[in-house]
Image (spheres, rainbow, N blue to C red):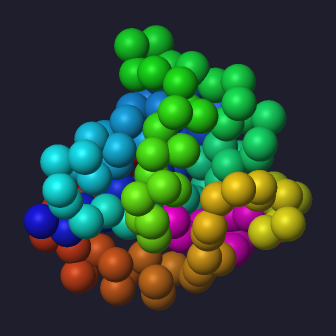
Amino acid sequence: MKFLIHVTCGIESPSKAAMAFLVAKTAIESGHKVSMFLAADSVQLLRPAVIESMVGLGTGAMKDHVAAISAAGAEIYVSGLSAKTRGLCKDDIKGIEITVAMPDVLVKAAAEADRVLCY
């Protein structure tokens, strides 16, 4: 099965944000194909300091989830508009392969997914 995980929550909601990454990691470990699209405040989650320090209540450490998702080669899209307005550029993101994308990519990914989960 192909999952799209669309994330819009950010550092203001660490448990919910970590849950999105935990679910992505779990789907990958269960043999499913996963892509993620981070938009709005969620783009801040990819800052190295956030990945290193964020731990959700009952949802685990972001660094563990991100490492597993990256190692599996999951496609991670980052909203170009959201990143730009929050001062985040591709060079700020370390050790994670991302694709900067516009809303048309989100629409296409959602249309191609078997399931879309939103956090």
Q: Is residue 100 magenta?
A: no
**10 or 22: which is nearer to us?**
22
For the point 35% across and 44% down, the residue is 25
Residue 40 lies, in percent from the top left, at 61, 55
Residues rendered magenta in the picture: 76-84
Residue pictured at 45% horizontal, 66% vertical: 73
Farthest residue to the front: give it.
71
Q: Position of residue 76 (x, y in %)?
A: 51, 65
At a point 54% along the width and 44% down the height, the residue shown is 67
Relative to the observer, which residue lies in front, 28 or 58?
28
Quadrant in which residue 91 is drawn: bottom right
The x and y percentages for residue 89 are 83, 66
Q: Quadrant of the C terminus?
A: top left
Quarter holding residue 14: top right
Q: Position of residue 41 (x, y in %)?
A: 64, 48
Q: Quadrant of residue 100?
A: bottom right
Image side of residue 61 versus residue 29, left or right: right
Instruction: State whether residue 74 is above or below residue 110.
Output: above
Viewer-proximal residue, 5 or 71? 71
Q: In the image, is 12 to the left or to the right of 34?
A: right
Kindly tell me whether residue 107 is visible in this rendering.
yes
